Amino acid sequence: MFRFILSDSVRVVSSICAKNRIFLPTKFSTHFASKTFHPKMTISAPADVDKLQDAANRMRISSIEQTCAANSGHPTSSCSAAEIVATLFFAEMRYDVKDPRSASADRFILSKGHACPILYAAWEEAGLLSRDQVLSLRKIDSDIEGHPTPRLNFIDVATGSLGQGLSCAAGMAYTGKYVDRSSYRVYCLMGDGESAEGSVWEAAAFASFYKLDNLVAIVDVNRLGQSQETQLQHDIDAYVQRFAAFGWNAIGLEDGHDISALLNAYANAKKVTGKPTAIIAKTLKGKGIDGVADLNNQHGKPVSKDKAEPIRALLKSDKPANWTIPAPIGDAPAVDLGIGAIAMSAPPQYKMGEKVATRQAYGNALLKLAEANKRVIALDGDISNSTFSNLVQKKLPEQFVQCYIAEQNMVGVGVGMACRGRVLPHVSTFAAFFTRAGDQIRMGAVSFTNVKFTGSHCGVSIGEDGPSQMALEDLALFSALPASVVLYPSDAVSAERATELAANYTGITYTRVSRPTTPVLYTTDEKFELGKCKVIRENPADTILLVGAGVTLYECLTAHDLLSAQGIRVAVIDLFSVKPIDAETLAQQAKRVGGKVLTVEDHYEAGGVGSAVCVALADVANVRVRSLCVRELPRSGPPEALMELYGISANAIVKAVKNFQ
Amino acid sequence: MFRFILSDSVRVVSSICAKNRIFLPTKFSTHFASKTFHPKMTISAPADVDKLQDAANRMRISSIEQTCAANSGHPTSSCSAAEIVATLFFAEMRYDVKDPRSASADRFILSKGHACPILYAAWEEAGLLSRDQVLSLRKIDSDIEGHPTPRLNFIDVATGSLGQGLSCAAGMAYTGKYVDRSSYRVYCLMGDGESAEGSVWEAAAFASFYKLDNLVAIVDVNRLGQSQETQLQHDIDAYVQRFAAFGWNAIGLEDGHDISALLNAYANAKKVTGKPTAIIAKTLKGKGIDGVADLNNQHGKPVSKDKAEPIRALLKSDKPANWTIPAPIGDAPAVDLGIGAIAMSAPPQYKMGEKVATRQAYGNALLKLAEANKRVIALDGDISNSTFSNLVQKKLPEQFVQCYIAEQNMVGVGVGMACRGRVLPHVSTFAAFFTRAGDQIRMGAVSFTNVKFTGSHCGVSIGEDGPSQMALEDLALFSALPASVVLYPSDAVSAERATELAANYTGITYTRVSRPTTPVLYTTDEKFELGKCKVIRENPADTILLVGAGVTLYECLTAHDLLSAQGIRVAVIDLFSVKPIDAETLAQQAKRVGGKVLTVEDHYEAGGVGSAVCVALADVANVRVRSLCVRELPRSGPPEALMELYGISANAIVKAVKNFQ
């Protein structure tokens, strides 16, 4: 028994209501007669249905056994999705079991990552994983982890922090439709609980706006969260309404365990053009597990192993079937994002002393990278005219994705686009607003993603817009990611090179750029490296080492001149690379000047330049570090006045140097 | 000319469509005949309308003049909202101009914070602000900042990072309806661009779930974002559909500059019970400014001062009117959250050596605080059974708010609840998931909020669930907030006291608690202080100082014993207070042992314990610090094995101590 609730059917009935001139945004599906609006169906042969049901039950048993072997994990969340996953893997998707990351294969994203036992069971059923492998769930020497990560070749993005999969899926679907122009489709399995996450609705708006008809989301509405019932429980209509209101073809299934209903919903999705499809499947958490199914307080707990026996009794065969899985169509083009493939179309072109904002240089570099490689794509959150990513938007519109004011989704889309090496996404916004996507960025790191982040408008030097727009914790955010690179260029030449270096590093990078214009310091042929700073003022008589970056580097230079005039010599380092940090040069220079180091930054103390330098020099004997940074919540005002007020100006540096005994 | 698109009218028409058994989630309002479904209206007297229109135009002029004086700011975003704000302030809300923070007054939240000139203009019109004051916009010596902050007594929450106001408003409305049980109403003015933020939909779901009929959101749909058109442009119906699908009474206004239409919409909102109201107002960006209105590329730019003249020509009076503003009803009770008002109902009760997880101790302390003060309220994101906030949920359900899996909104609701000192919100979830709400937490700091955050399941010591669930950057996140306090208790006694200390600090606090059980180290009468560590192993023969916290403190203690057995003495500090840090004791102990310090933490390097200690000791001569921390992306496995693998175990400490030359 199943029913469809089809938003698409609205086209059929719109004429009825148009006569009555009504507007009906709220619930009507209670009045819905299922027979009336079934789409045209090609009911699968009963044999297929039985075979798929058998697979779903084998996968249930495997999920139970995996979590028993691990003595932890989520069998009930797995069991609610057994038929959804079985039908997708063995009657819908095209892929190559021997090459799960094939560029042309359909994508599957398990947004409700805690249900991964059912995914591992699907790959066991498909023949990729052995029984021993799936039973190694959650062991320290196994990549069959507690939540999926791309350590496994059939996982594109790590999931487990809920509500993120749909953004990644949308990024993959966008890439498939507009970049690869390939026929692969993208399937995202979501939980109902996670649909409370706003990022889901950011992704929903994005996917309909870009008409991603190659994207199918299936919501496994099993009614129960971790600690209690979800907000909407089994109100399938409410989910259908929400997705429909967000521009999706939304299909409600009264029984999400009904194989035929699922197959028909997938078939319907394929017919719908110009919009993504959401299949809202009413399921039972722990479906099939006697005394556990549909009960509260059963989240994330193994069940006793004998609970598998009644399910086993239903099986026609306890061996995986010989599935004939349709091969990928093979129409995704080859992509080269490897070494040497990412270079700017022209070197930096600035005159020494010319005043250029590093954010503008970022835009220039981004355009040059995009010109040189079609797979360099810029993502924006409606501030491209501030970050200068609008240079790409104007000149190469096909390499620009407007993500609107939805930073979480923007990052998730970027992570999705980067998968399988299809695209080198450059995500830029105000640096402060990356905090909005902190969790997506964190999960990007868990996904070993290769997204390039650039944040503009850092620090108090943005001026009058005030603290809500000032990034003063962005270095902390990005430095606290495993294997991240954090660059902080000070002039236009180094900003272009930072952008290029970041593009050529495989992994998460963050480049911090500034709003005010600053003079060009380097000749256009200056070489920059990750993990290398620049000593830009050096004299045998130096008594203190100043370390600056961005706007504060110029304050250091001014202080250097003011102090020199008074006979006090100071060395000045342009830090450039916050992570990795050039501990060697810092230590060498610190010792050379006698051990006194003063860092100056337009950032809060924790996790910033000073803290990075302190850590880098912590084990060096006879070195002391003091830091000038923003130590309280700033306010609106002119940039120079704010730098003075918060003690990171040349005057403040002069004073600190003189006081440093 | 105006029209209503009323989701509520659905009740009227449902019978029509029920006959046809249809489900209509998508657009119909194009077929809508406005006359048919107008609600019953009490059209305001023409004189009032004219007076309000005059006020709106004076406020427009003021907005133009403010931004001209500042030579920056957002006049066009202000002008689209002039009638909305004028009608709210002078024909709808109850408040006291002399006491804007009156507990019983209606609340107004300008979610589109960049439009603050229109808000300042409203308070000028109301008589609170002088002309000179509003013309000090964005000056460094003025609290009339570029985006609103609570430095001003008529601002409850800072805005400027978009899409956050509705969560705060929902928190205030929840407090008004369920905690204060007062008649004040809450009005939130949003932009259309910001409604792309998922947090808006988290808030929308929350507000309808809790039937917040005292909440009105007005969306100023002016069609234009910063860099280009919004996704939905002027598709009012789409907004109406989305809010309706999220359970709101949604009203579309064809002309959001129509005073009567706005007044009637507010009147309709007051009549609707059991759901919040969204008024979707079609407006023009820069309305009234010739040659600017409704044009792209006019965001955040002052216009020439003479653009005010045509608007001035429309005025009947250029002086603020003598408004009779209805006083607050005065039914919000007095609340005491001051010194001495927040204490646990009983001291910690544990036996030395008893194994208790600090997360459980947090739950125990939270319950005792809640028992002692009705205004202590716990907010959860569907993991109360993991954080132990379910102790409050079970025993004091009225002091518990289930926010479901929507951390951004949970934090925003907390910030809203804390406003005007009504509630002391305790927000807890897995520590990793606070990254989801990084921007809301950041803006909470800009709001000088008094929310208490507690994150459980930190570090690799959570074990098998894997990296997506492990917080390894939470200390970095919370330390990089101005004026924040960050506590990291190691045993149950200190965890209870940390919770109590945090509750008694005014400002953002973060308490990091752990999943595994750990032995009780302190007697129940041990005193703890913010900014004070505990030296728990000290011997004149010590040669190294170990600094641990949480699970690593026990590794330090084990290492201490292993080393002692080999004749190597080490001191051990329980850091407890990461920020403020006890620099004095650390320095004193570091010097005492000869200058070698080894920190050990279940956190990444950047922004964690080691980095805080490095910064604290950076200016102390002859001290060297080394750090053991998690240096790569971890994986699933048993806690002890992971701590071993990532080098933060007792064995790793022993080795590091021996290698520290």
Image (cartoon, coloured by chain):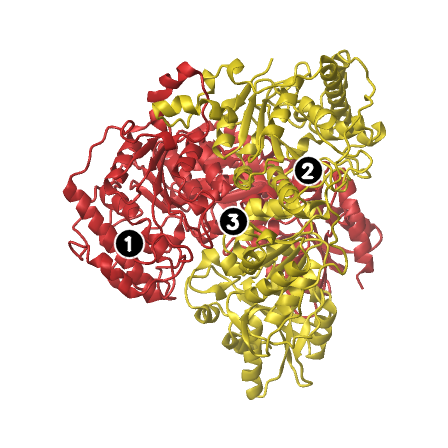
Chain colours: A yellow, B red
Checking the image for residue B288, the label placed there is 1
Q: Position of residue A79 (x, y in %)?
A: 68, 22
Which amino acid type corresponds to the residue marked 1 in the rendered image?
Answer: Gly
> Quick one: quadrant of the C terminus of chain A?
bottom right
Query: Which residue appears at 47% of the width and 35% of the height?
Result: B370
Q: Is residue A79 visible?
A: no
The correct choice, above or below, for A26 with respect to A511 in the image is above
Q: Which residue is mark 2?
A: A183
Q: Are marks 3 and 1 on the same chain?
A: yes
Residues tagged 2 and 3 counted as in contact (Cβ below 8 A): no
Kindly identify which chain the residue marked by label 2 belongs to.
Answer: A
Kindly identify which chain the residue marked by label 3 belongs to.
Answer: B
Quadrant of residue A585 within the rendered picture = bottom right
Kindly identify which chain the residue marked by label 1 belongs to.
Answer: B
Q: Marks 3/1: CA distance?
A: 34 Å
Q: Position of residue B598 (x, y in %)?
A: 73, 57
Left or right: where A306 falls relative to B28:
right
Residues tagged 3 and 1 counted as in contact (Cβ below 8 A): no
